[in-house]
Amino acid sequence: MRGRVFVLVPFLLLALVPAPSAEEPTPRPLLVTVDDLPIAGGGHDDPEERRRITDGLLGHLKDHGIEAVGLVTWRNVRDAGDRALLEQWLAAGHELGNHSYGHPNYSTTPFEAYREDMDRARVELEALLGSHGHQLRFFRFPFLREGDSPEKVAAMRAYLEETGQQNLPVTLDNQDWSYDGPWTEARRAGDAAGAAAVAEDYHAALRISIRHHERRGDRLLGRTTPQILLLHANAIGAAEWGRLFEWLEQTGHRFARADEVLTEPLLASPPAVVAPKGFGTWDRLWQQQGAEQAREGAVSVLTTQAAAWNAGDLEAFCAVYAEDASYVSSTGVTQGRPAILERYRERYPDRAAMGTLSFEVLEARPAAGVEVTMLGDAAPSRVHAVSVVARWRLAYVDRDAAEGWTLLVLRRRGDGWEMVQDASL
Ligand SMILES: [Zn+2]
């Protein structure tokens, strides 16, 4: 567990640093959550196998002192045997939450139908939990999809509030479920080497995802962030979680209960996201922060431009245009920064002609979407462009002001932004 770290760290410090301060970094709290209980996927129909998988999963959790939250997909509860599997989770001290009846996709399901599905599962789960003296607290959106319109997002938030269910987010999103099919197939074919190869990929994919999302969360918040790991109740997990949990322990994690990680406000009430795909909490924050920075960056280009204009410096004014920028006016299209600068020089030959420029930004829209990573995860893209609608105004001391509208398209240039298209009216 931590033994290796204790031995290695002082040795390295003594070897490399004259005055070692052998301080252990504070372990990172991590909540393990397990989706699609009792058994995920359709490939494990044999009741005996379902029991074996459950025993395997619960065994690894117990070995590592983990109190997990299991999210039940009620369609997967097929009979009394499956109910008994859920009772095994409760008896082992884990908490169960609602993960829908039929695992619908909220992006393609109207709210009413979605709510009906959620409620069908809620009633069943509340009855089961009630008979064991427990209360339902948590809900997790299937596919982490929380709504593709602001109205749908708001409707589910209100429904969860009404029914006393708390959205349990994920920070360490990954594709662990996708390795179960190939692993199970290899095992059934007696291909031990094939199964071992799939298991290697399973661990590698989880480690890549965990490192990536932890780094992102830590950078966003400037501190060690607590994490919520998403796993699925499947056969590869029953075989491989021991190794996964050992790796987590060796890499500075401490298994935490739900109540502890939910002291983090961003996890207790995760930021709303309107998107056709679902992704983890840090990705959402990263997207929001990126969009905000892009808006600010675009607006600052206009501020820079106005300052240059008002200093009588047309060259600096035009420096924000891309080399290949297009300038569109009522008289036509001007191509390229040198031609745009020339056009301004002709029309505004001196300070008196230039007046004083100001902009009023009406909207700045960052263009970003959802990407799919090499490992199959949905992830927000960075902002590649911002379009801006603004009103421009030229004030003069000796005559009336001139006013008009402008639509600008900006793209990244180094740390900032450059204008690629400018339509000014
Ligand atoms: Zn699920």
Image (cartoon, helix red, strand yellow):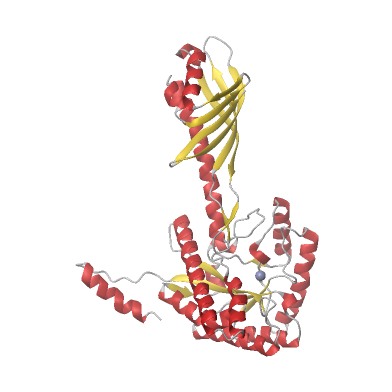
For residue 16, above or below residue 196: above
Report which quarter residue 110 is drawn in: bottom right
Residue 338 location (% of width, % of height): 46, 24
Q: In the figure, is residue 124 to the left or right of 298?
A: right
Q: Residue 1 versus residue 204: which sits nearer the camera?
A: 204
Image quadrant occupied by the C terminus: top right
Question: In which quadrant of the rendered view does residue 379 lie?
Answer: bottom right
Q: Residue at x 57, y 22 (%)?
A: 393
Q: Is residue 83 above or below residue 227?
A: below
Please give the name of the residue rendered at 48% of the width and 66% of the height, measured from the top-left corner: 208
Could you say where residue 214 lies in the image, as x and y percent from the top left?
47, 63
Image quarter for ligand 1: bottom right
Q: How many marks?
A: 0
Residue 335 visible to the viewer? yes
Q: Of all residues shown, which one is farthest toward the top?
A: 398
Q: Residue at x 53, y 33 (%)?
A: 420
Judging depth in this view, the residue of 416 and 22 nearest the camera is 416
Q: Nearer the viewer, residue 300 or 161?
A: 300
Q: Quadrant of residue 405?
A: top right
Question: Residue 66: in sight, yes or no?
Answer: no
Residue lying at 51% horizontally and 44% vertically, measured from the top left: 293
- Residue 319 at x, y percent in the picture: 44, 28
